[in-house]
Amino acid sequence: MKANQAVYSVALLCRVLGVSASGYYAWLERLPSRRAQADEQLSVRIRELHTRSRETYGMPRIHAELADAGTPVGRKRVARLMARMGLAGISRRTGFKTTVRDRDACPAPDLVARRFAAEQPDRLWVADITYVPTLAGFLFLAVVLDVCTRRIVGWAMANHLRTALILDALNMAIWQRRPIEVIHHSDQGTQYTSIAFGLRCKQVGVRPSMGSVGDCLRLRDVRELLRHTRMRAARPPALRNACSGSYRDLRVHRRLVQPASSALIPRLLVTRSIREEHKHDPQNP
C-alpha cells in the first residue's frame, strides 16, 4: 500500500486488500517490534562474518561462529536471515575426473615398482593433474615433483585437459633442472600415453614410467599435495605462490612441498649417506 499510495488512494487500497484505513495509519507510526530490532542487529553481525570469510561461510559455519562468540541463536533463524539478505556459502563442487585411460594406447613400463625413493635430485620425478574449482569454472593444474627434495620442479595451469598442459609442466621442469635420464612417473591418463608426450620425452632424454591400473600408492605424495591444494586454494594468485615456493597464502603439507634450496641439497645428501653408513655398520647396535 505504501508503495502504491501515490498512484491509488488509500481508501481504494484498503477496500481492495480488506483492511481498515486506521489500521494502516497505525502500522505506519508503529515502531519495529523487539524481535525485528534483534533481527536487524543479528543481520549486521551475520554480514560481517560472511564478509570476513571472503563470502565462503554458509549457515552452519556462521551459526558456529555466533555460538563461539556467545550469541545464542537458532540455526533456522540464521538461515532465514541469510536468505533474506541473499547470502550463501561456497561448497565443494562435484569432483572432476582428470584421468581417462586410452585402452588402445601402449603405456610405458613401470620403472619405479612402488619404490618412491631417490638418493639424489633429478633421478625420479612424479607427475599428476588435478582440478581447482573457481567461480569461473574448473582450472586444471599439472605438476612435476622431485621425489628426493619434495620440490615442485615444473607446473602449468590451463582451462583444458589437453596434452599441452602436461607438456608445459614438463618443459618447465626440464628448463629449471636440466636433468640427465630422469625417470618421469605418472598414471596412464591419455595425456601421458599420447604420442606428443612420448616424443618430447625422447627428445630431452626423459624416461617415462607409468604405474599399474588401480595402484593407489603410485602417486601418493603428489596426490596428497594436489588434494591439499584443491581444498586450500582460494584464488589463483595463492596457487601460483604455492607452486613458486611462497606458502603464506596457501597452507599445504610442508613435508610434501618443502622447497629445498641449492645450498640445502648437498647437506641433505651428506646426511643421507651418513645414515646409510650407520645402517650397514656391523658395530652399530
Image (cartoon, rainbow, N blue to C red):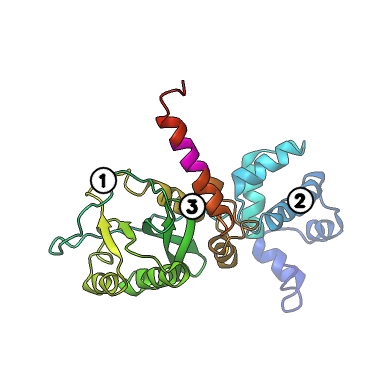
| Residue at mark 3 | 149
| Residue at mark 1 | 113
Of badges 2 and 3, nearer the viewer stands 3
Element class at badge 3: loop
Element class at badge 2: helix
* Extent of the magenta region: 271-276
In the image, residue 185 lies at what x, y percent? 31, 56
The mark nearer the N terminus, 1 or 2, is 2
| Residue at mark 2 | 45
What residue is drawn where x is 15% and y is 62%? 106
Q: Tell whether 250 sits left or right of 273.
A: right
Q: Mark 3: which amino acid?
A: Thr
What residue is drawn where x is 43% and y is 37%? 276
The mark nearer the N terminus, 3 or 1, is 1
Crowd band around label 3 with a 10 angstrom C-alpha radius: few (<14), some (14–19), many (20+)? many
Q: Is residue 120 above or below residue 279?
A: below
Distance (Cα) linking label 2 and label 3: 46 Å
Crowd band around label 2 with a 10 angstrom C-alpha radius: few (<14), some (14–19), many (20+)? some
In the image, residue 206 lies at what x, y percent? 30, 66
Q: Mark 1: which amino acid?
A: Ala
Residue 34 magenta-highlighted: no
The extreme front residue here reads: 283
Q: Mark 2: which amino acid?
A: Arg
Give me the disc on residue 96. Answer: none
Distance (Cα) linking label 3 and label 1: 20 Å
Q: Is residue 27 above or below residue 274?
A: below
246 or 161: nearer the viewer: 246
Q: Tell whether 62 sits left or right of 107.
A: right
Q: Quadrant of residue 126?
A: bottom left
Q: Quadrant of residue 162?
A: bottom left
Pointer 2 with pointer 3, Cβ within 8 A: no
81 or 29: nearer the viewer: 81
